[in-house]
Image: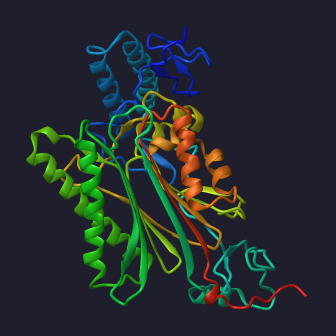
Amino acid sequence: MTQPTGRRCFFCGAPNSSTARFCSACGNAISGDVEPEAVLLPGAKRLNVSSDVLSLRELLAMVESGIYWWQQRLHHADTVNRERAAAAIKDLSNILESLSQQLAQGRETVRITSRLPAVRVYELTCPICGRGNRASARYCVACGSLFANIQRGALQESAQNAPLLLLNIAMRTDVGKVRQNNEDSCYAGRITTSDGMQSTLLIVADGMGGAQAGEEASRLASEAVKQALVDALRNTNPNDDQAWQTLLRQAAIAANQRVYAAAQANRNQRGMGTTLTIALIANNRIHLAHIGDSRAYVLNAYGVTTDGSRLLQLTADHTLVARLVDIGQLSNEEARTHPNRNMLYRALGADATIEADASSQALNAGDILVLCSDGLTVHVNDQELLDIALSGASSQNICDQLVDLANQRGGRDNISVIVARATLNARRRAEPTTRS
């Protein structure tokens, strides 16, 4: 007799009977069929993260909010989920005790032991192809141009004359294997600035609120960002990173106002919200604005940082778990399956005001920019993302492989991926000076 397959294991994706409490393939506990909805924690939404410290009091308030949320779950959940809630409360209570002891000892901040690097840094930029290189490089790693007879200062000044890069863009959004509707929204398109230059806009938004509220929130946010940027760039052309970042923050604020107003006007949509990750690419620069736990990555086979790393996460998750990773309480692998990973302390549309992270990065030849919702990253780790993205497949095939892999492992949430591959514009490429 064929065993019913009512549940798929979150950890390995294996099918199990509808009554199974533990996976027959890997032994992990099965705690329900659906990935928990994102939860916006009350209080501590303005958590400040400096370069190396976190506020103990702000983090303490966030942990207390998490405990309160799980306590409410104890009263209206089945046995398995009550056990999950109890385990989460115990875990958070231990963290709460540790933080409280540090406050009692007079400490107001806790040092960050594991922090995402914020910006890729190269001291040499090739004037021929625009690719970043280490300070000690004699030849460009991308086009082979000789640096020996070119002054370092001249290299930096001539970076702006590097040929513009071409972008091959693909995207895919998928409802996954469990949810009934897709609350993610994706967008990829062009925007023209006031001087006629073309820029590329990429957006991933992951809605929350249940039923169709999350779907509406992500759609409204995406539309509001597009409209705000089109209107602004019709009359202006930002001339530096700070100006671009200000523009993106203003677009995020406009999106927040639109989602918040819609939620207040419709009682059935009260409390709806969405994550928002925006990448605007102009003049070989990536400008980012970010709220929530969707992500942006940049990958390159030659490396994206001076230490040779080939993958760099450009955004920091606004989640309780991410902050616990920051202070060494959890590892990155533990965070991927932690019961509190869905607890956000910042989301668009939840309040009348919002703060967005913003940054700017170099875009180099060979870069692959990836935007995705957490429906991907909960199933696919960074190394797997890197391997698939650098496999030589097309942008669309990369999207398909990533989404298919997440679905093979259970597809417990909606999955959205945008891939943009940067290549040299051959028509504008100068002839490099190569080795003799």
Quadrant for the C terminus in the image: bottom right
- When the figure is inspected, residue 127 is found, relative to residue 282, above or below; the finding is below
Please tell me which residue lies in front, 423 or 3: 3
Q: Position of residue 153 (x, y in %)?
A: 66, 88
Quadrant for the N terminus in the image: top right
- When the figure is inspected, residue 81 is found, relative to residue 291, above or below; the finding is above
The residue that appears at 62% across and 18% down in the rendered structure is: 25
Please tell me which residue lies in front, 65 or 214: 214
Q: Quadrant of residue 167?
A: bottom right
In this rendering, the count of numbered labels is: 0
Q: In this view, does 97 lie to the left or right of 146?
A: left
Q: In which quarter of the image is residue 64?
A: top left
Q: Is residue 255 left or right of residue 36?
A: left
The residue that appears at 16% across and 41% down in the rendered structure is: 269
Q: Is residue 91 left or right of residue 247?
A: right
Q: Where is residue 314 in the image (x, y as percent from the top left)?
A: 52, 58
Which residue lies most toward the front here?
Answer: 1
- When the figure is inspected, residue 297 is found, relative to residue 56, above or below; the finding is below
